[in-house]
Image: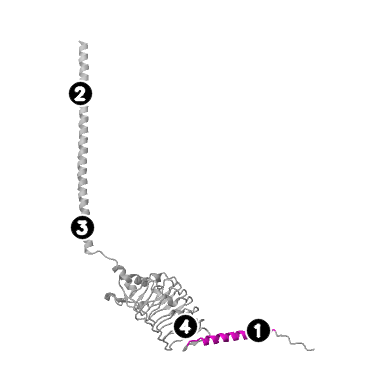
Amino acid sequence: MRLAPQPSAQTPRLLLVALLLSTRGLASQLLSSGCPERCVCDEQLVVQCAGQHLTSFPADLPLATRQLIISNNLIAELPALALNYLSDLVYLDCSNNTLTEISQSTFGNLRKLAYLDLSFNILTRIEDRTFAPLDSLVMLRMTDNPFLSEIHQDAFVENLALQVLDVSRNNLTVLNISSLIALPALRSLGLSGNPWSCECGSEELCLWVHLEGFKFQDEGQTVCGSPDDLQGRRLGEAGVQLRTLCHHTLGSWDYLFFVIIGFVIFAAGTVLAWVMGVIMVLYERYIKKKDEQLELDEEEELATESGRTSRARGEQENALLKHTV
């Protein structure tokens, strides 16, 4: 009687390997099947669409995409609805396109995004809390936007993980740094290539560059664009000068006021001293007269007493004479 063959101990292991291979192949197949036209997708969840002459944001992106590169195209808008489906996205390169604006809703669901490149576009301004949803943002590049002239002071107020910010070679003339100073992780800031206005309104920025120059990329090329007497001067150097210039000095009317006040105080002091002198003289005279009057009274009292004594003696002598006779 022949026994049935026993299952080998290797069978479960082989089945597991086969299952993993088939799953991996299926995942790869699903990723490839969902890859946008003219883009390349790989098993590392990287979608590469650079330089494909795209005029709109690529459609049908795999939802598991972690890196998306759409640089060197003609994309004019980032659709919030399509972009925010990519909740696992950590890297987004949108450089060298024709983006004109972005808003807080653009990145509303990208909580894991750590790298964002918006360089070489035609952005004009950055609104309030534009990057607020990006809790994990570590590096932000917004260089070479020739029309970018305004960044709201609270644009980065909630990006506490931000370490590198580059806004070089834009059209910025002023920058409110109150929220930037408060960022605990910020260690590198690029400001060069902007026509900075080194007026009193930029004193805080210039002094910050002077005090913490190690944080600034190309600090030597971060220079003033205006006014003419400070044009080309490094912001750090201008900060020291503005610290003196921007605090108002006394004018001619101020000096005249102080002269008049000084004269009034001097005159009042002189008059007061004269009055006090007169009072002292009168007081001394009064004391002197009082002392003289006391002396006269004492003399009169002594004279009166002496007269009384003389009369008493005379009376005694007369009484003795009469008694003798």
Q: CA distance from mark 1 to mark 4?
A: 37 Å
Name the image quarter holding residue 220: bottom left
The disc, 1 or 4, on the residue closer to the chain's N-terminal end is: 1
Q: Earlier in the sequence, mark 2 or mark 1?
A: 1
Residue 271 sits above or below residue 230 on the image: above
Where does label 4 land, which residue?
Answer: 68
**Disc 2 target residue:** 307
Q: Mark 1 or mark 3, which is nearer the start of the sequence?
A: 1
Mark 3 to mark 2 CA distance (whole Å): 70 Å
**Which secondary structure type mostly characterizes the magenta part of the structure?**
helix
Foreground: disc 3 or disc 2: 3
Magenta stretch containing residue 87, yes or no? no
Q: Position of residue 291 (x, y in %)?
A: 22, 35
Of badges 2 and 4, the one in the foreground is 4
| Label 3 sits on residue | 260
Instruction: For the residues labelled 2 and 4, say whether their Cβ atoms are less than 8 Å apart.
Output: no
In the picture, measured across the screen, residue 200 lies left or right of residue 301, that is right
Front tag of 4 and 3 = 4
Measured Cα–Cα span from mark 3 to mark 1: 103 Å
Point 21% across, 62% down: residue = 253
Vertical order, 275 against 219 (above or below): above
The region drawn magenta spans 9-36
Look at 21% across and 40% down and name the residue there.
284
Report which residue position mark 1 lands on: 13
Q: Position of residue 185 (x, y in %)?
A: 45, 72
Give the Cα distance between marks 4 and 3.
74 Å
